[in-house]
Structures are given as structure tokens and as C-alpha cells.
């Protein structure tokens, strides 16, 4: 017999589009809840990739993302006309 997962505990990919807004409002947005979500994502990332924790690859990806997102607001998009 299949067990029924409560709506609040569903993962994002299991939520239907029409239920998305109510699912987002049910999420825990206090700092402890946000930190828990990051921790679960961190553990899932390393469990799926079978990487050593604290490896250079993980650190370099975080550094590259930081550099990209910090430089993005300073980049001026110009239209080039031919």
C-alpha cells in the first residue's frame, strides 16, 4: 500500500503547477528553515556525485558562482548595430 506524503512535505518536482503558489507559502522562511534547506541540498549534492567533502572541485564551483553573480550587475549590455 502506497503511503500518502503530506502536501507540505512534497518536493518541488512533485508539486503540480496549480498547487505551486500554496506550496511556496507553506514553506519555512525563518533562518533555521532556510539553513535546513541548504543543508539538505548540500547532502543530496554530495550523495549523488560521490565526491569527497571539502574537495577542490566543490570549492571552485562555489567561487565561480560567487564571481559570476557579483560581476553580473556591473556588466553593461550594449547593442551592437551592424
Image (tube, rainbow, N blue to C red):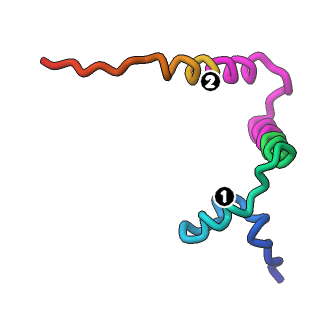
Which residues fall within the magenta stretch? 41-65
Q: Position of residue 9 (x, y in %)?
A: 79, 64
Q: Residue 49 vs residue 52: left or right? A: left
**Count of numbered labels shown in the rendering:** 2
Per the image, is 55 magenta? yes
Q: Where is residue 16 in the image (x, y as percent from the top left)?
A: 59, 68
Residue at x 72% of width, y 20% of height: 57
Element carrying mark 2: helix
Q: Mark 2 points at which residue?
A: 65
Sequence-wise first label, 2 or 1: 1
Q: Where is residue 25 in the image (x, y as percent from the top left)?
A: 68, 61
Per the image, is 44 magenta? yes
Question: On the rendered image, what quadrant is the C terminus found in?
Answer: top left
Kindly report the distance in space between the C-alpha atoms of the residues bearing marks 2 and 1: 23 Å
Element carrying mark 1: helix
Classify residue 52 by image quadrant.
top right
Q: Residues within 10 Å of mark 1 (few under 14, many from 20)?
A: few
Residue at x 58% of width, y 19% of height: 70
Pick out the residue farthest to the left. Answer: 82
Q: Which of 34 and 14 is in front in this view?
A: 34
Q: Residue 12 carries which label?
A: 1
Q: Which of 5 and 50 is in front in this view?
A: 5
Classify residue 61 by image quadrant.
top right
Residue at x 77% of width, y 42% of height: 41
Pick out the residue farthest to the bottom. Answer: 1
Amino acid at each position: 500500500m502506497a503511503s500518502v506524503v503530506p502536501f507540505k512535505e512534497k518536493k518541488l518536482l512533485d508539486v503540480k503547477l496549480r498547487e505551486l503558489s500554496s506550496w511556496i507559502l507553506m514553506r519555512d522562511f525563518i533562518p533555521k528553515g532556510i539553513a535546513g534547506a541548504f543543508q539538505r541540498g548540500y547532502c543530496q549534492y554530495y550523495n549523488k556525485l560521490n565526491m569527497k567533502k571539502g574537495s577542490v572541485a566543490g570549492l571552485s564551483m562555489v567561487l565561480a558562482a560567487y564571481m559570476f553573480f557579483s560581476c553580473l550587475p556591473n556588466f553593461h549590455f550594449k547593442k551592437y548595430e551592424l
